[in-house]
């Protein structure tokens, strides 16, 4: 899968995957979504981001999990 909006540069942010060459790591965006922030809240906090950046960040984060079987632990 090719990602148009995810970039890595060893000279920027230690090579951490970022959004469109900005100093906004994919992990930061995914974490905000996981914490329950809405797209509008994230876009207000980071005005350089676009809605499609958020979607691609989620797709990028999901990619390593494709076609992998992860054990689920039951909780009681």
Image (cartoon, grey):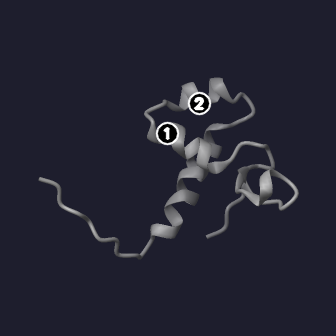
Residue drawn at the location 53% of the way across and 52% of the way down: 58
Q: Quadrant of residue 49?
A: top right
Residue drawn at the location 72% of the way across and 28% of the way down: 47
Give neighbour class at mark 1: few <14, some 14-19, many 20+ (Cα, 10 Å). Answer: some
Residue drawn at the location 70% of the way across and 56% of the way down: 17
Mark seen at residue 42: 2
Q: Secondary structure at mark 1?
A: helix
Is label 1 in contact with label 2 (beta carbons under 8 Å)?
yes
Q: Is residue 1 left or right of residue 73?
A: right
- Of residues 3 and 42, the one nearer the viewer is 42
**With respect to residue 53, does 9 lie above or below?**
below
Q: Quadrant of residue 48?
A: top right
Q: CA distance from mark 1 to mark 2?
A: 8 Å
Residue farthest front in this picture = 76
Residue position for label 1: 33
Give neighbour class at mark 2: few <14, some 14-19, many 20+ (Cα, 10 Å). Answer: some
Q: Position of residue 38 (x, y in %)?
A: 49, 30
């Amino acid at each position: 899968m090719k990602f148009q909006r995810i970039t890595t540069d060893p000279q920027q942010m230690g090579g951490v995957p970022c959004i469109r060459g900005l100093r906004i790591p994919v992990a930061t965006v995914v974490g905000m979504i996981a914490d329950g922030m809405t797209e509008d809240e994230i876009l207000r906090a980071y005005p350089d981001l676009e809605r499609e950046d958020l979607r691609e960040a989620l797709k990028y984060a999901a990619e390593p999990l494709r076609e992998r079987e992860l054990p689920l632990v039951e909780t009681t």
